[in-house]
Amino acid sequence: MTTKWLVEVEAGLLLRDDETGVELPLWIPAVVAVFDRYGKPLAAAPPPPSDPAVELPLGEGRRGRVRAFRFRGYGDVELTDYLLLERDDTEPVAAPAPLVAAALLHLARAAQPRTS
């Protein structure tokens, strides 16, 4: 997982669209909503992160972090990429990275103004 697809900027987050090469603005509550929908609590402590965490200001003084890790589940032949959302006030949840990335990309594209 060497590609940095979620980029922190002063105004919030940008999501890199590899198909178009464009960085799309991403609403932080959308990130939380995707993890709320697809994320599951971890059965054990996560492995060490393979990338630095992306910090998320969640409002009201709360913070969150999205970080990546690789895990070989029972019966898996290869390591699988996962993303982990850690929030100050709730249990961490993880989801497959391709699933989270696809959902966020869809939301970021849908939020773009339509051109005629």
Image (spheres, rainbow, N blue to C red):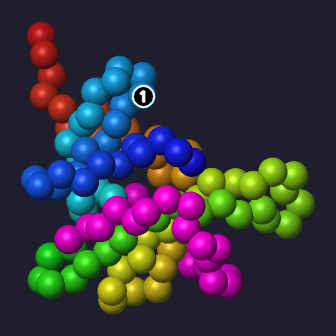
The residue under the point 29% across, 67% down is 55
Q: Which residues are magenta?
A: 32-57
Whole-percent x, y for residue 61 in the image: 15, 84
**Residue 84 appears in the rendering:** yes
The furthest residue to the top: 116
Whole-percent x, y for residue 90 in the image: 39, 86
**Residue 88 colored magenta?**
no
Q: Amino acid at mark 1?
A: Asp
Q: Secondary structure at mark 1?
A: loop
Q: Is residue 90 above or below residue 19?
A: below
The residue under the point 24% across, 36% down is 24
Q: Which residue is mark 1?
A: 18
99 on left or right of 25: right
Quarter of the C terminus within the rendering: top left
Q: Is residue 108 above or below residue 35?
A: above
Residue 2 or residue 68, whichever sits in front: 2
Whole-percent x, y for residue 46 in the image: 62, 77
Characterize the local packing of mark 1: few (<14), some (14-19) or many (20 or more) Cα atoms within 10 angstroms: few
69 on left or right of 27: right
User: Quarter-wise, where is residue 109 in the image?
Assistant: top left
Number of numbered discs present?
Answer: 1
Q: Is residue 110 above or below residue 1?
A: above
The residue under the point 63% across, 83% down is 45
The furthest residue to the bottom: 89
**Residue 107 appears in the rendering:** no
Whole-percent x, y for residue 64 in the image: 32, 74
**Residue 47 colored magenta?**
yes
54 on left or right of 63: right
